[in-house]
Image: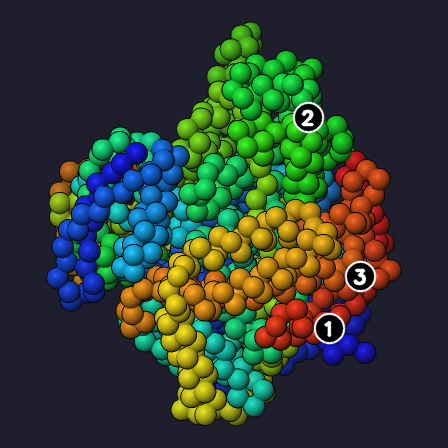
Amino acid sequence: MKLTLKIWRQAGPEAKGKMVTYPLDGVDGDMSFLEMMDILNEELVNKGEEPVEFDHDCREGICGSCNMMINGQPHGPQKLTTTCQLHMRKFNDGDTITIEPWRAAAFPVIKDLIVDRSSFDRIQQAGAYVSVNTSGNTQDANSIPVEKEKADEAFHSATCIGCGACVAACKNASAMLFTSAKVSQYALLPQGEVEATKRVQDMVRQMDIEGFGNCTNTGACMIECPKGIKLENIARMNREYLKAETVS
Amino acid sequence: MSVLDSKVPQGPLAEKWVKHKNTINLVNPANKRNIDVIVVGTGLAGGSAAATLAELGYNVKTFCYNDSPRRAHSIAAQGGINAAKNYQGDGDSNFRLFYDTIKGGDYRSREANVHRLAEVSSNIIDQCVAQGVPFAREYGGLLDNRSFGGVLVSRTFYAAGQTGQQLLLGAYSALNRQINRGKVTPFNRHEMLDLVKVDGKARGIIARNLVTGEIERHGAHAVVIASGGYGNVFFLSTNAMGSNVMAAWRTHRRGAYFANPCYTQIHPTCIPVSGEHQSKLTLMSESLRNDGRIWVPKNLEDAKAIREGKLRGVDLKEEDRDYYLERRYPAFGNLVPRDVASRAAKERCDAGYGVNKTGNAVYLDFEASFLRYGKVEALTSGNKDASEAEMIALGKKVIEKKYGNLFDMYRNITDENPYEVPMKIFPAVHYTMGGLWVDYNLQTTVPGCFAAGEANFSDHGANRLGASALMQGLADGYFVLPYTIGDYLANEIRTGEISTETPEFEQAEKDTRARIEKLMNGAGTHSVDYYHKKLGLIMWNKCGMSRNATDLQAAMDEIAELRADFWKNVKVPGSADTKNQELEKAGRVADFLELGELFAKDALTRNESCGGHFREEYQTAEGEALRDDENFAFVSAWEYNENPRDAKLHKEDLVFENVELKTRSYK
């Protein structure tokens, strides 16, 4: 199929960016979206031009590197799918596709479609862990039984890949879904109880410092999340936070 | 006498590790605060090692090319992690895990290392659960297990089809805790470009900031390489796009021996190649072989009709199907080790029984398990006379719970629904058992430079069993390296801070800059990918699932020629002073072009078949791998030469005191 691509090009963090149009031929339905981008880049390199920079790595939908705003939707039109797992059979011959980076004050552009998501790391560093040393003297794993339903729910919250689609989808650029998924994982497990109060306070504080917006319950984050992280996580984090503030 | 000293402690096998830990040197807590360690790579091995070293009190710097440590490719591991917990009471023990691993590796690994791995395996599960890793559980609230290939017990712990992700996020959380305390400084979007040695010891690295293009010097008292495997030398593999050999190869160039480069794992269950545009291959977890049955048509005409689209596999009658693994290996059936399953698939496809357009695919079929699980589900939910259709529907739900994410991924990529038609699969490059040679302390032949996880060669011999990579990565990082490194660092307490303003750092930086300049100034005929794809084809066709002397010799020549052409004609646009993905790729492919030749040389030198290394000249009448224990029970450790074909071979003899060397049989 033949496509017209409109892609955000920006030489560096301080440079002024703009949309650039590229026609592309020879795209096959079995290609992934990123393989389509590979073809464009190969063409650009062969012409001696700089290829479009984008983050990607595993191409299996699990590392959370890829992040493209495709026709105004994070990761494109297919539900529960990362950009790398989106295939060109979802598009038609003659389509025009616009491709932009995530837009959020807390995710500054580095180059072209690459943004700086280190703010996500700093939220996790603030408290997303259980303080247990790797001494090898921990208790036997089966001495901490966990109700299957709760374990499954904690697992589901833990499947967040940290791609940032939730922030990109939100009109407030809020990171509540991301932060709450991690808070929920620990809140649902007995291992997380001891540090629950401090954890939620520290992580929420860091989220605010990073400049993410507030949550106004539009639910766009859940709709666009490639892993289907649920809004209940946000409700749970709000409860945990209220509880923590009341206690302290 | 070999120059290689494995430093395996004396004494009975089961006591070596404990005794070693009790007798090696320790560094006191106050001194640890004055010692710096660099960890390159933040996957399971690097992430866990960095967290633990910082916990112990060392100052740690981590380096990864991704934007966050959480994205290392350990995250893509699907099936599970082994541990000899014996929670199922099915006769598991440390010795059995040790024995299975030695046998699975076709008797080409070091006994003492493998036994240590089995000993610490249980600790890993305890540690991860304490950290809040959400493993799969049974209704009673206890941990669930599944089976993997090459073993007869259920010792694999898992978190749906995302075990690697959950374990890596566990290690990442431990790392974050230390970053928050200021004990670890993360250098993300950085790539190690050289190892710096001072007076023969590793004293730091040269790294490139991938965002700004700056070349940086980093000093430390020890350097840990945990940068993963080199499967991407084949271009197409299940590795991440960025996975590369650079850190390990730069270390090799500075004097660390590279061991068994030809030991590569070709994983039997991957989604087949669909076209020339393909950029990577996707694994379908080995855990699927617990419930899926592998088959091809019994008759060549049926296979042909399926390839031409005139017949559907799902319509083929039971008696017209050849469940070739169950037929050839009745004892292990669909759960034979990976190398055996891969070769069997290739054998059937080469004989003309392949079931997709290209003829390079076999079926992985879940029909039988839909019914089996559905029946139990119907009975336990009170439906005592469910129809077959009802049972199949219930069974599909059970399978969805176990492998839902894998089935979705398959459907997304192939546009076929695996709940309705059998999956099509084919072997693909997945893991490399070879890597930097290390002694029992995980130290390379460069003092002060250590290697952990897939980057070293130590535990899997010539073939790795499923669910053992995660085990080894975390064993090395949490429980082995942080202690063995102390034996070396105990002698460094008087060294003081490592200055980077020395002639050695100066020279290394100069070399690095010259190399980048050379890459930027190629004649500009072909893109980096052009060379990478060519190299991949040579590797796959001549150094892949089966090898012979003629092809290997040809591969060496072709790779040397390609490398010369690359350095003359590669085209890297843009500048070296900004983010430049083509430059990043060029540096990595340049190293693959050296490694590839050494790989072929290693395969050519090893005149036997063992595990994943199958030489056509050395096979039994039934087509099984034929080992030569008399002449090849050794580790090949190569000393660097700029012409890889002239690399010097050093041998570490493998001594087996606790297992009898047998012909591996899964029949």
Q: In 3D space, how far apart are the residues under numbered discs 3 and 1 (Cα atoms)?
A: 13 Å
Q: Quadrant of residue B372?
A: top right
Q: Earlier in the sequence, mark 3 or mark 2?
A: 2
Residue B79, x across and y down, in percent:
54, 42
Residue for badge 2 = B323
Residue for badge 1 = B650
Q: Is residue B78 above or below residue B382?
A: below
Q: Is residue B476 above or below residue A93?
A: below
Of B533 and B441, nearer the camera is B533
Residue A185, x across and y down, in percent:
37, 46
Residue for badge 3 = B633
Of B368 and A68, nearer the camera is A68
Element at badge 3? loop
Element at badge 1? strand
Compared across the picture, whether B249 is left or right of A64 comes to right
Q: Chain of mark 2?
A: B
